[in-house]
Image (spheres, helix red, strand yellow):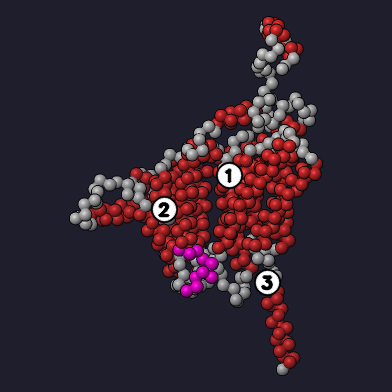
Amino acid sequence: MAEAEESPGDPGTASPRPLMRDLKAVGKKFMHVLYPRKSNTLLRDWDLWGPLILCVTLALMLQRDSADSEKDGGPQFAEVFVIVWFGAVTITLNSKLLGGNISFFQSLCVLGYCILPLTVAMLICRLVLLADPGPVNFMVRLFVVIVMFAWSIVASTAFLADSQPPNRRALAVYPVFLFYFVISWMILTFTPQ
Amino acid sequence: MAAVDDLQFEEFGNAATSLTANPDATTVNIEDPGETPKHQPGSPRGSGREEDDELLGNDDSDKTELLAGQKKSSPFWTFEYYQTFFDVDTYQVFDRIKGSLLPIPGKNFVRLYIRSNPDLYGPFWICATLVFAIAISGNLSNFLIHLGEKTYHYVPEFRKVSIAATIIYAYAWLVPLALWGFLMWRNSKVMNIVSYSFLEIVCVYGYSLFIYIPTAILWIIPQKAVRWILVMIALGISGSLLTMTFWPAVREDNRRVALATIVTIVLLHMLLSVGCLAYFFDAPEMDHLPTTTATPNQTVAAAKSS
């Protein structure tokens, strides 16, 4: 974690306070992603718990109920994990190589937290898919995914764009666009058995 | 060493006399910048062909190459070393992409656009975009082709992303490596005027793949004729870009070797595009006909036999 003023090194005291404090910090960052403003909270107090929770939730929801999910052609749990983390690391490296002044973990934190709108979209899509399949069903899901995709892009650009010099901003933002586009595609093409 | 006639400056009359006194003295000839570094495109005075000037860039490419030799001075285990490969601005990347889409005869892509500043941003992200463009377009196209069939169940075919990634990245790195090795080997046998560094070759190949991104998206259209026309157009554009880039590098060589090299380059490019079309995109219209025409025949035959 970013700040470690209280060291939990004393084995006798198993206090719940650090856990509540961390959960509150994660929740606060969720709010910052949902209502993106120019604030430094995500950057200053970075943590990777939120991205981990979101990634696991997304990967679990992208699983199918069928026993032979291998034949289905959809992404496995490990594949979703690899895409999210490998993609985030690649974008962060790209941003640093272009000369951005954001730290490695801050960038991972921002990219991970901005998956939140797409996780919400996945939830909505799963609920919509409980109804009858058909073109209307698909249109609703398409609309939701597009809106959440735009939301993710806007949220992450609000935090990341300032860290790049202006003559390279588009070069740093394009991979973010590609990353969230691929995740949106995985969400949109999810078909339960 | 230099002849005494070359050193006839008005003010330095005693230079000539000192050279005749000591002919082995080293002299610095600052008139001609065309002889020093190894990536030198060659002195324009040496060859009488005017098209060399356009192909080899104008004079300040000499200066940028001399400066480029001083640029990459960090050791390879530091982060700054790799930052030199990402030293491009947005407009430069756009210019390079535009240059790859409009290959003008006589303009060398490397000399005109790359100018001793090869970047890895373009090749890497163009390949990444192409991987997803091919996988997603292939999936969409198969979905649209098989849309009416009762037995078709849509699958996202996620495996194909990893296969596409392997193919594209292997092509974008291994073929330039092989080509660079081949050109270095020929350079040791025949004195070529133009020689490219490995990163410049990777850069050219990366940017030449850009045309396949809109091509892959347009391949969704389920018409065989349209797809093959697109293959021809894309191959024409990127093939001519590669040919115009590498022809000056093999021109000095044996005629047959030079032609064989160019033909191999274009052939590999064609293999990539046709292979991707065949593997990721199902053939249109071929799957419909047997299922729809077989059933009436079967019902007629069953009626006749009963």
For mark 3, give the secondary structure. loop
Residue B83 seen = no
Residue at the spot of label 3:
B287
Q: Is mark 1 on a helix, strand or loop?
A: helix
Could you tell me the amino acid type at mark 1? Gly
Circle 2 — which element? Answer: helix
Q: In this view, does B36 lie above or below B111?
A: above
Rounded to the nearest angstrom, the CA distance separating label 3 from label 2 is 43 Å
Q: Which disc, if any, is residue A112?
A: 2
Mark found first going from the N terminus, 1 or 3: 1
Q: Distance between the residues labelled 1 and 3?
A: 39 Å
| Percent coordinates x, y for residue A174 in the rendering | 52, 47
Visible in this render: residue B50? yes
Answer few, some or many: residues within 10 Å of disc 3's Cα (few below 14, many 20 plus, some between 14 and 19): few
Quadrant assignment, res B39: top right
Q: In which quarter of the image is residue A101?
A: top left
Q: In this view of the protein, which residue sits in the foreground, A156 or A107?
A: A107
Q: Marks 1 and 2, how far apart in space?
A: 25 Å
Magenta-tinted stretch: A66-77
Q: Residues within 10 Å of mark 1 (few under 14, many from 20)?
A: many
Pointer 1 with pointer 3, Cβ within 8 A: no
Q: Which amino acid does label 3 sit on?
A: Asp
Residue A180: assigned label: none
The image position of residue A42, as x and y in percent, is 36, 47
Identified by mark 2, the residue type is: Gly
Q: Nearer the viewer, mark 1 or mark 3?
A: 1
